Amino acid sequence: MADGTEFDGTPIESRALIGSDVLAVQRGESVEVEVTGNVTPTNANLQVAGPDIDLFSQNDIVLISDCEAADLFRISSNPSSGTWAHANNVNSSNRVSQEYTDDARIMRFSANVYFVADTGRNDAQGNDIRALYRGTNNLLNSATPSFQIDEIVEGVDSLQIEYGELLPTGNMRYATADNVGNMANVVAIRVGMLISDTDQVRNNADTADYALPGETIEATTGAAAGAVTHPEDQRLRRSFVSTVMLRNRD
């Protein structure tokens, strides 16, 4: 949630809309870099080759994986040399967890955060205009990594998430983060957004409630205390929900 502690001291903490969820996505970005040598756990570096080597910088965080296991490390040497050291002064260890073959691939580690916030702009009637933002983590500085914040979609009023937890019975139940029994059993996520137009084109006030995963966005009048609400103005609104299955959770 936007009122949690995961992003204390970052622009996300001060800007994210309270009552709207925050989605963090960490992944490996495919690049043309292959492992060519020094792949045993006793080595403190890897030999690599490929046309994308020059896209990397010292202190970049990279992921090596053979689709069975993976290691994450920070490059401590000059990447253009083709020898990527992972010294323990910038890593928790200067060893990888296993021996990798030439089938293993190197990927750039990417960390993005998506959240809803006020743009600081108003519509013609003076209502706040919200948007979906993306925070991209600048991981080069190991001591104080920072987020570059970019607005990506105007008119997103709320972002809500539920987690699909696989139960011992084989059934799946969807629940909010604080109600999931075991996050290791989550095999899907359901993401919902409430979108509004910036222009007031309705003939009457919008008094509808909008069901999103784990939260109903209620019209202001008559809403319960603590409810997430939307103003009863004449903007058009629509909810969108998508379910994403997570691979390799077993």
Image (cartoon, grey):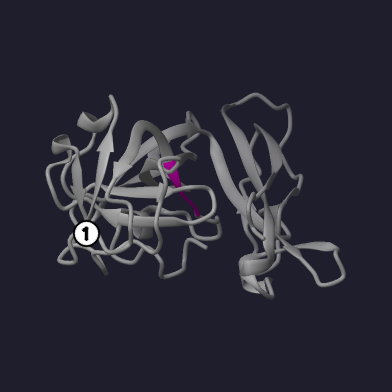
- Using residue 150 as the reference point, say whether residue 92 is left or right of it: left
Please check the rendered image and state whether residue 25 is part of the magenta-colored stretch, yes or no.
yes
Q: In terms of depth relative to the viewer, which is nearer, 26 or 134?
A: 26
Amino acid type, residue under disc 1 in the picture: Ala
Residue occupying image coordinates x 48% and y 61%: 2
- Using residue 179 as the reference point, say whether residue 115 is left or right of it: left
Q: Position of residue 203 (x, y in %)?
A: 73, 27
Please check the rendered image and state whether residue 4 is part of the magenta-colored stretch, yes or no.
no
* Main secondary structure along the magenta-highlighted residues: strand
Badge 1 element: loop
Q: Quadrant of residue 169?
A: bottom right
Q: Quadrant of residue 135?
A: top left
Residue occupying image coordinates x 74% and y 45%: 207
Q: Which residues are magenta?
A: 23-28
Q: Is residue 218 above or below residue 224?
A: above
Q: Is residue 112 visible?
A: no
Q: In terms of depth relative to the viewer, which is nearer, 148 or 116?
A: 148
Q: Quadrant of residue 149?
A: top left
Q: In terms of depth relative to the viewer, which is nearer, 171 or 247?
A: 247
Residue occupying image coordinates x 65% and y 47%: 191
Q: Position of residue 105 (x, y in %)?
A: 41, 41
Q: Position of residue 116 (x, y in %)?
A: 48, 47
Report crowding for label 1: few under 14, some 14 to 19, many 20 or more residues within 10 A (C-alpha). some
Q: Give the labeled residue for mark 1.
A: 44
- Using residue 26 as the reference point, say whether residue 183 is left or right of it: right
Q: Is residue 69 visible?
A: yes
Q: Quadrant of the C terminus?
A: bottom right
Residue occupying image coordinates x 66% and y 65%: 176
Give the tally of numbered discs.
Answer: 1
Q: Position of residue 40 (x, y in %)?
A: 33, 57
Q: In terms of depth relative to the viewer, which is nearer, 211 or 94?
A: 94
